[in-house]
Image (cartoon, coloured by chain):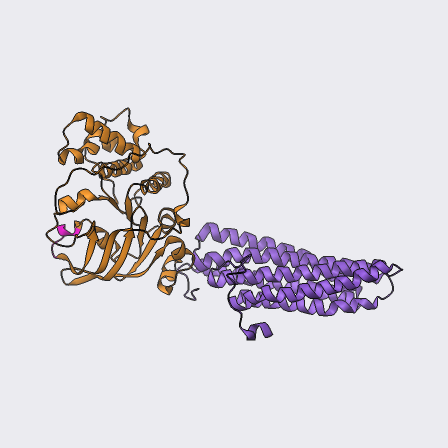
Chain colours: A orange, B purple
Amino acid sequence: MPLLTEAPPRKRPETPPMTQDAPKTPAADSTAPAGIPAIQVKGVDFSYGDKQVLKNVTLDVPQNQVVAFIGPSGCGKTTLLRCFNRMNDLVPGARVTKGSIIIEGANIADKSIDPVQLRRHVGMVFQKYNPFPRSIYENVAYGPRTLGERKKAALDEIVEKSLRRAALWDEVKDRLDDIATGLSGGQQQRLCIARTIAVDPEIILMDEPCSALDPIATAHVEDLIFSLKDHYTIVIVTHNMQQATRVSDRTAFFYLGEVVEYDTTRKIFENPVQKRTLDYISGRFG
Amino acid sequence: MHSDTPHILREFDQAFASLRNEVIAMAGQARLNLERAMQGLLQRDLERCKAAIADDDEVDEAELRIDRIGMETLVRFHPVASDLRLVITTMKCAANLERVSDHATNIAKRARKMLSRSECAEVAFLEPLYALADQQLRDAMSAYTDRNAELGASLQLRDKDLDKMHKRLIATFTARLEEGGERAEDYLHLVFVARSLERIGDLAKNIGEDAVYLDQARDIRHDKQNRPPVSDEVRAE
């Protein structure tokens, strides 16, 4: 679907409700080929004013895979993530100065692309869960309603489907009118994921989604990430190496604005090619 | 690939140094036990046989220490890449060395029984087999400690030479055994000693395969297609 034009909602094949005991294969063991790219980053330079933070970044994010961005603070991984739905537009002086980012055939770095329309296709989950101070139902229904959905039955269906996919339905189905901020931290983050899913994106960006969560809530979110890749392409920024190995199919290591190494997660964590990658993942970074 | 850059956590480097030192010492003790057992047999030296049997406990204890350090390292530091391979292969190497020492003990016990009888000239037939097994064990440990995949992989081919020599010896001893006579019991002991030496060659091959995995993250066990090329220089050694 072209991003430049409004189009009817996409039809995806219906999938059965996600269950806790669905058969799974560890993501870190995936040796599947890269597949069709959902995002193509080609030679991207990015600057905040005069400060260049991304240098000639090139990588493909395959469809229906989870790609982890790792690297030390300030290496550019979050900047690239925020390029994918133009969140950097909100920062004065921030711009792609070279290269292109292709999503669904369009260069989304091009200013002619409507960022609001883009964000419908590329949703984002933030480090700190941020539900609206409204009911659980309203949090999920907000996006579809903003996009013009007014029918109560349709909204009910979207809310249930989104909460099911976010593995939250069973926990909140009897209290959809309760205020969202009353949920536990992990539930609030999963609600934010449900809110993202509700507008039916193709791609979900996650910026350290578990950094504010305890290990149990983190496990729930990681389990969810693994389930979601059947329907969505996911890019996750994480400082947690074990999390990258658990949830991602491919991993990119960033350093000083460059992609040092990008390969299957298994290859990166078992036998990386670049010494800088090995030193970083093994805790030898000076 | 592995990195010589020091880890941010000094305790990490200390734990890995400890693991490395323990396995080197264990290999030295296992080889010493084997040497004592074989010298005890070849030179009819009861004291050496007894020492080989007694010192097997030290090798057993070393295996336990290495497993404990390895487990602690996994739990505390969550190593990845070459560090993870080092922990896994060190624990496997320790298990192989423990078996080497067990075979040395078996040889020493057979030797002790043979020493109570008159000298058997055919004992000398075992010398070349022992020399080959010991050389392979030494090279396996060199491959492991030097992360030398080529040398490690070469042990797969060299083990076949040892197997052939073992087969020839077994045929010789079995033929004499079938002839009967008062030496029959000695030949039976020699068959078992030869069998232990052949198994030590297998264990050296296992360590060599683990050295390849440690160095290159390639698992060459049971994989005839995927063996790294071995240069003539290494094969000649």
Q: Is residue A208 visible?
A: no
Q: Is residue A170 visible?
A: yes
- Quadrant of res B156: bottom right
The x, y position of residue A110, in whole percent, is 13, 54
B25 in the magenta segment: no
- Quadrant of res B168: bottom right
Foreground pick, A78 / A205: A205
- Relative side of A36 to B176, left or right: left
- Quadrant of res B121: bottom right
Q: Where, quadrant-wise, is the N terminus of chain B in this rendering?
A: bottom left
- Relative side of B110 to A277, left or right: right
- Relative side of B202 to A101, left or right: right
Residue extent of the magenta highlight: A88-93
Foreground pick, A48 / A215: A48
The x, y position of residue A121, in whole percent, is 20, 44
The x, y position of residue B26, in whole percent, is 61, 61
A90 in the magenta segment: yes
- Relative side of B168 to A210, left or right: right
Q: Where, quadrant-wise, is the C terminus of chain B in this rendering?
A: bottom right
